[in-house]
Image: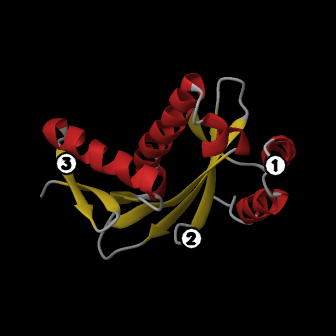
Amino acid sequence: MEVVQLTVESIEAARANWTTAAIESDMPETDVEMRMDWAAKHISYVDQAAAFAYGIVDDQKRIVGLMDIYYSKRPGKDQGWLKMMQLYLSPEYSYEVVKDNADKILTVADIYTAAITGTIELTGAHKARVVKIFGRDELLFTILVALKTQLAAIATFNVTIEGRWLVLSPKE
């Protein structure tokens, strides 16, 4: 799994795949449409003070996750914050589909891992020193709390939980 910049073509391919998966899973197609429409509006990666849509692709280069990433400029050189606000999974990885399938649960864990490490790796492209990852739902928040404990033991940077945010910042 890896984080990639999206294109109009990759979004349309994902829209088709995700819509098919939503229909097969009896999920509303409108959710897919809203997510893809938002992503299509946020694929300009030049503007530094904006929202960005990034994809997570699997080994077959299919988009299996969409990330809402926000960059906030802060005073000083390279002082921005990069925030992962939301991670959307393809309907084929919804809770109802994966809950009894160990292989798919591991794939979901891989998607979350790629999203978190990918956000950290994007700090160079977006000139950010602080990464904030929002635990929007209970699953992601639980993962972030566990990750905080593991990272704190090995990290060369500060790792804290602030509300529902996992915050990674340089040690001063």
Q: Residue at x 47, y 62 (%)?
A: 136
- Count the marks: 3
Bin the neighbour count of mark 2 within 10 Å (Cα to Cα): few under 14, some 14-19, many 20 and up. Answer: some
Q: Amino acid at mark 2?
A: Ala
Label of residue 50 in the image: 2
Above/below status of 119 relative to 47: above
Could you say where residue 172 lies in the image, as x and y percent from the top left?
Answer: 12, 58
Lower sequence index among marks 1 and 3:
1
Q: Can see residue 26? A: yes
Q: How is the image coloured?
A: secondary structure
Between 131 and 66, which is closer to the camera in this rendering? 66
Q: State if disc 3 and disc 2 touch (CB < 8 Å).
A: no
Q: CA distance from mark 2 to mark 3?
A: 25 Å
Q: Label 3: which residue? A: 157
| Quadrant assignment, res 83 | bottom left
Mark closer to the observer (1, 3): 1
The residue tagged 1 is 26
